[in-house]
Amino acid sequence: MRVLFSGLVALIVTSTVAFAQPLEPREGWQVINTDLTFPDLVSRMETAISAEKMGLVTQASASKGARAQGIGIPGNRVMGVYRNDFARRMLAASVAAGIEAPIRFYLAENEAGGSTLAWKTPSFVFAPYLAEGGDALQTLAIELDVIFVAIAQRATAQ
């Protein structure tokens, strides 16, 4: 019985370190595959967010949490990016759209040692709120689209 239990535990632990399928483009998403290591992409994103005068408002990492429990999984991080003046304009246009802020980037380590940067475009994120937010929210989303592309390009430029 102990051997069976030990084998089951080993199978579960080794299955958690396997790489999932790579991130692929989806409706409303932008995806950039890079040769950057995961730690390099994280660092470059932090620099790019600041350089584009945005704030890194939230961060979450399942891989960091797993590592704290002694489990190794491929690197991943969600970075919530926004700025207070955008928040005020968004809320003036649509209080309901506030649930979408901050808008997130997703960073994932790839099996080959590179990493992927992905995000839902702000225009896509705010699309469900345009009926109430009107031109003001659409203008804001378009401005954010440009900034998010600039952050991504700055972070992934070789």
Image: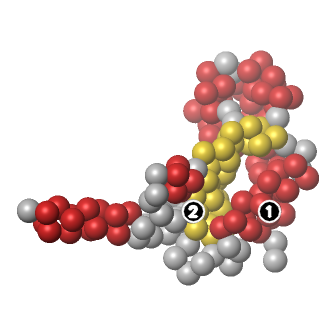
Q: Residue furthest left?
A: 1
Amino acid tagged 1: Arg
The quarter of the picture where residue 16 lies is: bottom left
Q: Quadrant of the C terminus?
A: bottom right
Q: What residue did someone put label 1 on?
A: 44
Residue 65 in the figure: left or right of residue 137: left
Q: Quadrant of the N terminus?
A: bottom left
Q: Nearer the viewer, mark 1 or mark 2?
A: 2
The structure residue drawn at horizontal position 52% and vertical position 52%, both measured from the top left corner, is: 68
Q: Is residue 77 visible?
A: yes
Pointer 1 with pointer 2, Cβ within 8 A: no
**Label 1 Cα crowd, 10 Å radius (few <14 / some 14-19 / many 20+):** some
Q: Which mark, residue 75?
A: 2
The quarter of the picture where residue 101 lies is: top right
The structure residue drawn at horizontal position 86% and vertical position 28%, both measured from the top left corner, is: 85
Picture coordinates of residue 107, whole percent (x, y):
63, 59
Closer to us: 145 or 135: 145
Q: Which mark, residue 148?
A: none
Amino acid tagged 2: Gly
Above/below status of 127 relative to 94: below
Closer to us: 104 or 66: 66
Work out whether mark 1 precedes mark 2 in sequence or the reverse, and give the earlier one: 1
Element type where label 1 sits in the image = helix
Picture coordinates of residue 4, whole percent (x, y):
13, 66
